Image (cartoon, grey):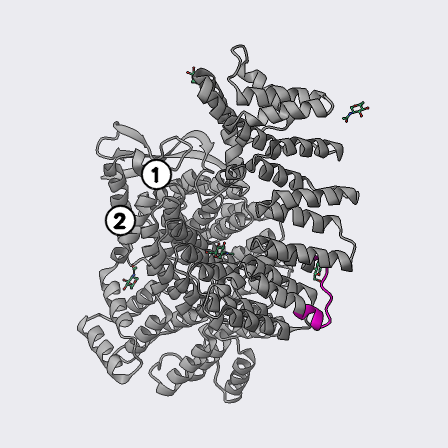
Amino acid sequence: MLTLRCVRKTRASLSYLPIFNTNITTSFFFISITTTTSSSESSTYPFLPPTPTIPTLHGISELQSKDVVLSFREWFKSRNNPVLDQIFEILGAQNGNDELSRQSTDLALSRLGLRLSEALVLEVLNYGKDVLSCLKFFDWVGRQHGFYHTRVTFIAIFKILSRAKLMSLILDFSEKYVKQRYIPRVGFYSTLVMGYAVAGKLEIALQLFGRMRFQGTDLDGLAYHVLLNALVEENCFDVVQIIAKQIAIHGFESEVTHSILMKSFCKQKQLDLAESFIRGLASSGQRLSGHILSPLVDALCKNNQFEKAGKLVEEFRESGMVHLEHAYSVWISDLVQAGKLDAALEFLQSKKSMEGYVPDVFRYNTLIWRLLRENRLEEVCDLLMELKENQICPDEVTLNAALCFFCKAGMVDIALELYNLRTEFSLSPSSMAYNYLINTLCGHGSVEEAYCVLNNSIHQGYFPGRKTFSILADALCREGRLDKIMELVILALEKNFIPSDSIYDKFISTLCRARRVEDGYLIHGQLNRLDKVASKNTYFNLISGFNKSSRGDIAARLLIEMQEKGHSPTRKLFRAVICCLCDMENPEKQFIKLLEMQLSRHEPDCQIYNFFIDGAGHAKRPELAREVYEMMGRSGIFPNLSSDILMLQSYLKSEKISDALNFFDDLSKRRKLGRKLYNTMIVGLCKAKRSDIAWEILQKMRENELKPSLECYEQLVKSLCSNKKYDMVFNLIDDLMKVGRHVSSFIGNVLLFHSLKTRELYKAWLRSRDVHNVTSFSLTLDELIFAFSHHIRANQDIEDLEEVIERCFPLDIYTYNMLLRKLSISRMDHACELFNRTFEAKRWVEEMFRKGFDPMKCTKQFI
Ligand SMILES: *[C@@H]1O[C@H](CO)[C@@H](O)[C@H](O)[C@H]1NC(C)=O
Ligand SMILES: *[C@@H]1O[C@H](CO)[C@@H](O)[C@H](O)[C@H]1NC(C)=O
Ligand SMILES: *[C@@H]1O[C@H](CO)[C@@H](O)[C@H](O)[C@H]1NC(C)=O
Ligand SMILES: *[C@@H]1O[C@H](CO)[C@@H](O)[C@H](O)[C@H]1NC(C)=O
Ligand SMILES: *[C@@H]1O[C@H](CO)[C@@H](O)[C@H](O)[C@H]1NC(C)=O
């Protein structure tokens, strides 16, 4: 037979477990597999390869992991009781409430040929899976000939009902049973009083009790104690004393009474009174039980008097108290709750070795869960093994803890196998176990399995936590499992689970990216129906998606919808929608319709008109832009500077140069032209390949003592170079220095690029050098342009060249590209060296990509 034992090995961090980012340090987890038949032979296998990467079971053989599964499976199965399973299968099978299904349940139960006894009923109720099945069974047993429910069975079902907080059901139940009178051994009124007491309806219980006394009957001992306990639970301490006195008078006083009274003192925080009460009992020679001590231990701990509680436990142990385990259990639970795990473990170990104390499974469970929470995995493992070796029957909580443990310890394969065997040992995983499984599976890239587990959990009635849902959603998006995404959303919506904005957004953008914008829109529609307001980003993704598939009409509808939901669209979004509309049939009509809708939404202002001018400009429809511009004036809104700039750009973008010039001219009549309008004009003209006019405008600008922007110089240099007007380029550069600007990387790169292509540039430079003053800048520029237009001098070292450039302008990745090109033409070995060093440069490219620049696109701009 195989046994498993945990062996503590080296200390290392388990924090790399992907889901549980914790910085708690725990041991590596090892399990030794030993055969009990030959105890001298024992071997240790690491369950986790000691690499700080993804922990998987790949490091250990399948055989070992099979052994683990097998041994846990045997243990888990030990909780099975075939007869009880059969009973609950029958009870669970018929969900109908009608007579027919009741009859078939009855028949099936009768066929089992059970020998009904109080003990059997209690066993079934304790084994109980769900309240309804227990109730059905209780009902069925009550109706069987020759069997009568006893106080004990009755109290057992009450407990189940009250634990499930089904108070109204308790009352229905009591009344029904009283009516049917098939519980002759429990008094008529007593039953009712107990029912009301357990259900917390103390006033009615007391009234009934009063009526009984008036009629000369009385409660029995059980009912008295149920009533007393309920009074303490509901803090009716005045009445507690009266009922306690009645109990004493009737001679019902027992350990149970004392224990309830202790609870009463403790609830009232009368801890000294409680202590003297128990000491009084002890000195009067009463037999003391752990049940009486437990409430005091608990109260002391809750009051942070752990030391005193511990001393009391020891003191009473020495005095020969019975049922000490009960007090031990409470003590351990309190220590665990207060996070004093080491103390709890130490206490447990010492009691185990000295007194043979074996905690019940509940205590183990509390400890295991807390240790799991704190990632003390090797101790969890110790405890699980201890349970197993002591053949303590695990309950559902233990099973779930074991599943979570295997997930946390990186043995998700084992967890999954045990999960797949769940029907064998009637395990229904808790939501926590589902979450662990799904998270861990996703972390291991087993998205398919994770999805199946989730599907199963949903069909079991659990919906995963938001975090789990989002982890799975992320994994599905990452792997592009679009169908699964749709399925997941539909499942979620069916269960009224509304994913968080970020998930929702991620799904929709994944779908849009995969050109499945219609599916994205479908999800969006579903959520809309649930009054869920999509984020601005979601709208952006949808609109962009429809823009891509040229559905301007839907894009426009979404734009309006998002405004209705309180988002204000950006200019970029308006632009996308307008561009898209302008690509459809009847663009003018569509455009005006959207504009009118927008204008009717609120007081028209400059901004909305500007958005439309901008949009029309980008759609290359300057006439539409102009119409909006005119409309503005007519409706009494004076176009501001932005309107003018956008209008001007609209003309320039469509290369309507004379319109642009006329407009510029008109503007100059209306207002003093500022820097921004000039800059717009110059840049726009350069882009429209009209460097000649741009040059003139720049001169005019300088005459008006305005300083052109760097972009003006850059675009003009580029445009002039393209038109081979190199002399003008150097005049322009001279002017750039005069206004106090520096040669930018862009300009430097353009110059290098063109000197690589032609020596004309160098010749122009020589001519201009004679005209302009020779400065240190021009000396280095000289060297540079020469180097690029000619062969590199033999002694010219590559570092030199780099240094020379650095003196002129800051190098960027394109400069390096250019250098590489130059060198590969002339000196292959230098190119190699540079290439080696461009690894440095590679870092920049990545950096640029990260910031959203596209180097390829940028390189193109020099051409
Ligand atoms: C989800 O579970 C249901 C019910 O168990 C099953 O019918 C369905 O096929 C499952 N779907 C997937 C994708 O596993
Ligand atoms: C809209 O579509 C056009 C053409 O496909 C594209 O160039 C533009 O970038 C898109 N705009 C947005 C905001 O997606
Ligand atoms: C023009 O008006 C819009 C809307 O009020 C405003 O956002 C923009 O900044 C204005 N432009 C200038 C240059 O003042
Ligand atoms: C050259 O520099 C000198 C002294 O700085 C100055 O006097 C002269 O005008 C400059 N010549 C030109 C053409 O800019
Ligand atoms: C480039 O680097 C490689 C490896 O680092 C080296 O072997 C090679 O000699 C280097 N080339 C030059 C030209 O420096």
| Residue closest to the eye, 679 or 552 | 679
Kind of residue at disc 1: Thr
Left or right, 470 with respect to 570, comes to left
Q: Residue 312 in the image: state x and y as whole percent.
A: 56, 48
Q: Residue furthest bottom?
A: 215
To which quarter of the image does residue 296 belong? bottom right
The N terminus lies in quadrant: top left
Q: Position of residue 628 (x, y in %)?
A: 63, 67
Q: Position of residue 54 (x, y in %)?
A: 39, 37
In the image: residue 102, left or right of residue 467:
left
In the image: residue 271, left or right of residue 512 = right
Q: On residue 73, which mark appears?
A: 2
840, above or below 321, in the image: above
Q: Is residue 722 magenta?
A: no
Q: Is residue 360 visible?
A: no
Taking the image in four quarters, ligand 3 sits in the one at bottom right
Task: Say above or below: 352 vs 810.
Answer: below
Residue 638 belongs to magenta span = yes
Question: Which of the 4 image quadrants contains residue 461?
Answer: bottom left
- Secondary element at tag 2: helix
- Determine crowd level at label 2: few under 14, some 14-19, many 20+ residues with C-alpha closer than 10 A: some
622 vs 53, nearest the viewer? 622
Magenta-drawn segment:
631-642
Image x and y of residue 115, in percent: 22, 70
Residue 56 circle label: 1
- Where on the picture, by quarter, is residue 157? bottom left
